[in-house]
Amino acid sequence: MSETSHAAGSSAGAAAEAPAVPRHVALVMDGNGRWARKRFMPRFFGHKQGVDALVRAVNVFADRGVEYLTVFAFSSENWKRPTEEVSGLMSLVLVAVSKYLTKMAGDGVRIRIVGDRSAVSDKLRQAWEHAEKLTQDNRRITLAVAFNYGGRWDVVQACRRAIEQGVPAEQIDEQWLSRNMALSFAPDPDLFIRTGGEMRISNFVLWQAAYSELFFTECLWPDFGEAEIDAALAAFAARDRRFGGIAPNTVVAG
Ligand code: IPE
Ligand code: IPE
Ligand code: MG
């Protein structure tokens, strides 16, 4: 790997003043189905609008100085949905790549796909490889698309790798695991946002969100625009991150 690995204890250490802008935002794009239902439209229409919302959001986050945006597009558990919704989502990804890849590449977006690729079609795998290759030198923002991803899958695949490589038990520590997990190219998410009103993690970045600030909003994903992004970033800027320590200006009684 030519790039710097941020995985080694990026959020550990002494408490520090939180930077005003998160370097890495993890985002659960939830509420597409409800957004469509409110308009008496099929769920697929909501997913389609969701793709457009994502393309807009990436540019807004980049403009605000966010370096990494990891979005939850399809979870390990989303296979439980009706077959036609699953196949609709698979074809939507292909359409989205052909519709938006050139624009995103031109906008300076580096695209990475994180998740278990073994279960998706060859066509989809090839589209992703093409998107990653085409954008690999872009540096404005990294968009990591979590697809067939689960936080538990990520921990398991890192453990399997350790065993396959014959890594001795004493060499397995938090840094080793972080370096061998799907988001090893990014620092841990500073801010975790979920749209759609549910207050749960749903098996997203379980390991990496250990010290993420959490932000939940009722806003349904297709409606999550510039104003909502700024509200989330403002909430983050007002948080006091301690990482288990104490606030920097705390007077410690002697
Ligand atoms: C999130 O929207 C997108 C995916 C899971 C692919 P949903 O499809 O979960 O929308 P709701 O939660 O049913 O409204
Ligand atoms: C989480 O949303 C997954 C994605 C947004 C891709 P879900 O809609 O699948 O989560 P649950 O089922 O409400 O927990
Ligand atoms: Mg949902």
Image (cartoon, helix red, strand yellow):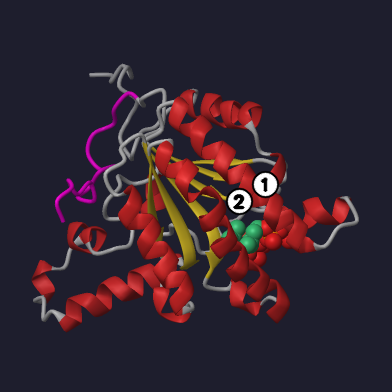
From where the camera sits, is residue 190 visible? no
Amino acid on which the number 2 mark rests in the picture: Met
Q: Which residue occupies 36% across, 25% down?
A: 19
Please state which of residues 197 and 169 is positioned toward the viewer in this rendering: 197
Instruction: Give coordinates of residue 217: x percent, y percent.
Output: 67, 40
The chief SS type of the magenta part is loop
Mark 2: is the Cβ under 8 angstroms from ligand 2? yes
Mark 1: is the Cβ under 8 angstroms from ligand 1? yes
Instruction: Give coordinates of residue 131: x percent, y percent.
Output: 39, 56
Instruction: Give coordinates of residue 132: x percent, y percent.
Output: 35, 56
Q: Which residue occupies 16% across, 68% down?
A: 172
- Which quadrant of the rendered structure holds the N terminus? bottom left
Region rendered in magenta? 1-17
Residue 159 falls within the magenta-colored stretch: no
Query: Given contact means CB atoms under 8 Å apart, are the residues at marks 2 and 1 in contact?
Result: yes
- Find residue 47 and report its image quarter: bottom right
- Find residue 17 and report its image quarter: top left
- Which quadrant of the rendered structure holds the C terminus? top left
Q: Which residue is mark 2?
A: 29
Instruction: Give coordinates of residue 161: x percent, y percent.
Output: 22, 76
Please state which of residues 242 and 76 is positioned toward the viewer in this rendering: 76
Secondary structure at badge 1 equals helix
Q: CA distance from mark 2 to mark 1?
A: 5 Å
Query: Is 172 situated above or below 142?
Result: below
Q: Which residue is mark 1?
A: 221
Residue 5 falls within the magenta-colored stretch: yes
